[in-house]
């Protein structure tokens, strides 16, 4: 009973926190790179059967109609399956459109079960965007990587989306060490030819429990960066790398969606936005947010060695511009850190973070930190998952405790007044993926801590 209640609580939290509507954990593939394979046994995630239409109706009051409804995105403690395996998926989509006529729906799918009837329904309901995880093209590779013995169905789904005019974004988990670079490039080109609005290329991540044949060289990230940079010059859709290759907080445009207001205004990939409506911007996140909120924003742009340029993006408030930018840093995060430091009256602050986020956070602190308190960043290695896992959201209390203990043992200045922890690693109760609360760290080290 406790497990069921925990799953139900997690489902409710998904809806309330992220407007994410879990439908089922059933999946029709067996991807070797699935985020739920090779997990340590202590990980607390929940597998759910196809939810009834009645349970979906009960969740409707918690949905925010002002935000997109997200289906099938595996970013929570619910194991997300393939939405189109749900026996009542058509009824669920009709229910959502009836309850929320103007709310966008974003649905992640592998495309295998997408047929003419479903494509027709998606077009008729309208305002539904698909995130299509194609991953690879060749029949042999799809069978090996995805356990897919219907390779033609997924490949054909791309044609159906174009035929019915359904907007979609493509995604690929890059496994060139297993499939070869040609298959990766052919998959990206295929999605581009069929008018995907954007494409995300994910660097794979494997825990220490993955078999050796799936592991990859430490040089893969640099090789991917070079590969994506080359494709951006010859393929006419925005290509986003996950995690992104970010060297600075300059608001550089990664891509521009074809036919969008930004494309009509004349902005190009590589442009650096320096001002929005006459006000300077300090990061990609800040620039993107200001442009999104504004009607007909005026943007100042730096383009290579050319003189400064100005563009007007013709759009309404809250309407997307078509600009595609990597996520770097919201300056508001630094403001939140400063508020916590003031409230705690801390003179020394230690910020725990992941190796991926540390460079960007250090740049943000150098640029935006104006508090009298001294702040230091400490990179936490992920030993719980191990392998190539480096994301902050997968750190555990154990990882942080090990790192903090070593730091304090080597410190010559004593304990900091405050330790800030990565909020992505914790749920709303302050517990990590093993259901361990971060208050254990406060008890162990005798230092005030907050997740942020």
Image: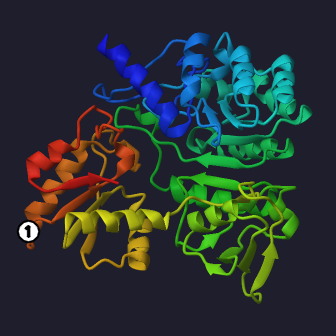
Picture coordinates of residue 118 (x, y %)?
A: 81, 20
Picture coordinates of residue 59 (x, y %)?
A: 55, 23
Q: Which residue is mark 1?
A: 414
Asked whether residue 131 appears in the rendered view, the answer is no
Residue farthest to the front? Answer: 61
| Point 42% across, 30% down: residue | 77
Would you identify the image quadrant in which residue 153 lies?
top right
Picture coordinates of residue 209 (x, y %)?
A: 35, 32
Picture coordinates of residue 56 (x, y %)?
A: 58, 18
Colour scheme of the picture: rainbow
Image position of 267 (left or right of 275): right
| Point 79% across, 67% down: residue | 296
Asked whether residue 154 appears in the rendered view, the answer is yes
Image position of 360 (left or right of 159): left
The answer to whether residue 238 is above or below residue 125 is below
| Point 67% across, 29% down: residue | 109
Identify the image quadrant of the C terminus. bottom left
**Label 1 crowd (10 A; few <14 / some 14-19 / many >=20):** few
The answer to whether residue 253 is above or below residue 98 is below
The answer to whether residue 160 is above or below residue 257 is above
The answer to whether residue 353 is above or below residue 33 is below
Residue farthest to the right? Answer: 163
Dot 1: what SS? loop
The foreground one among 288 and 268 is 288
The foreground one among 196 and 383 is 196
Identify the image quadrant of the N terminus. top left
């Amino acid at each position: 009973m406790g497990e069921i209640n925990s799953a139900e609580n997690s489902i409710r939290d998904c809806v309330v926190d992220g407007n994410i509507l879990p439908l089922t954990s059933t999946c029709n593939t067996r991807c070797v790179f699935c985020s739920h394979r090779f997990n340590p046994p202590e990980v607390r995630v929940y597998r759910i059967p196809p939810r009834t239409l009645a349970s979906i109706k009960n969740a409707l009051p918690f949905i925010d109609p002002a935000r997109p409804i997200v289906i099938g995105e595996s970013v929570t403690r619910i194991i997300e399956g393939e939405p189109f395996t749900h026996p009542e998926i058509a009824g669920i989509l009709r229910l959502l459109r009836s309850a929320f006529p103007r709310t966008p729906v974003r649905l992640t799918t592998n495309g295998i079960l997408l047929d003419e009837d479903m494509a027709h329904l998606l077009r008729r309901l309208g305002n539904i965007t698909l995130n299509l995880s194609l991953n690879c093209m060749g029949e042999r590779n799809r069978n090996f990587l995805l356990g897919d013995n219907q390779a033609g169905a997924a490949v054909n789904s791309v044609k159906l989306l174009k035929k019915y005019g359904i907007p979609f974004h493509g995604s690929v988990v890059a496994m060139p060490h297993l499939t070869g670079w040609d298959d990766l490039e052919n998959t990206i080109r295929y999605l581009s030819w069929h008018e995907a609005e954007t494409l995300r290329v994910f660097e794979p991540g494997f825990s220490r429990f993955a078999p050796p044949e799936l592991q990859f060289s430490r040089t893969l990230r640099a090789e991917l960066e070079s590969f994506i940079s080359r494709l951006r010059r010859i393929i006419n859709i925005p290509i986003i790398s996950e995690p992104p290759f970010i060297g600075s907080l300059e608001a550089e445009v990664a891509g521009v969606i074809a036919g969008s207001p930004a494309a009509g205004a004349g902005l190009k990939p590589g442009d650096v936005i320096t001002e929005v409506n006459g006000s300077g911007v300090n990061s990609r996140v800040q620039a993107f947010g200001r442009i999104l909120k504004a009607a007909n924003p005026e943007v100042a742009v730096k383009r290579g060695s050319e003189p400064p340029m100005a563009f007007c993006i013709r759009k309404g408030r809250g309407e997307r511009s078509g600009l595609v930018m990597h996520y770097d840093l919201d300056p508001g995060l630094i403001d939140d850190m400063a508020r916590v430091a003031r409230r705690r009256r801390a003179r020394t602050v230690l910020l725990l973070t992941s190796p991926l986020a540390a460079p960007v956070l250090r740049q943000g602190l150098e640029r935006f930190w104006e508090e009298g308190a001294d702040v230091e960043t400490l990179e936490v290695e992920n030993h719980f998952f191990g392998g190539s896992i480096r994301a902050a959201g997968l750190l555990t209390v154990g990882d942080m405790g090990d790192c903090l203990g070593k730091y304090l043992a080597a410190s010559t200045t004593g304990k900091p007044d405050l330790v800030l922890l990565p909020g992505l690693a914790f749920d709303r109760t302050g517990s990590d993926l093993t259901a361990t609360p971060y208050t254990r760290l406060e008890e162990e080290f005798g230092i005030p801590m907050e997740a942020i």
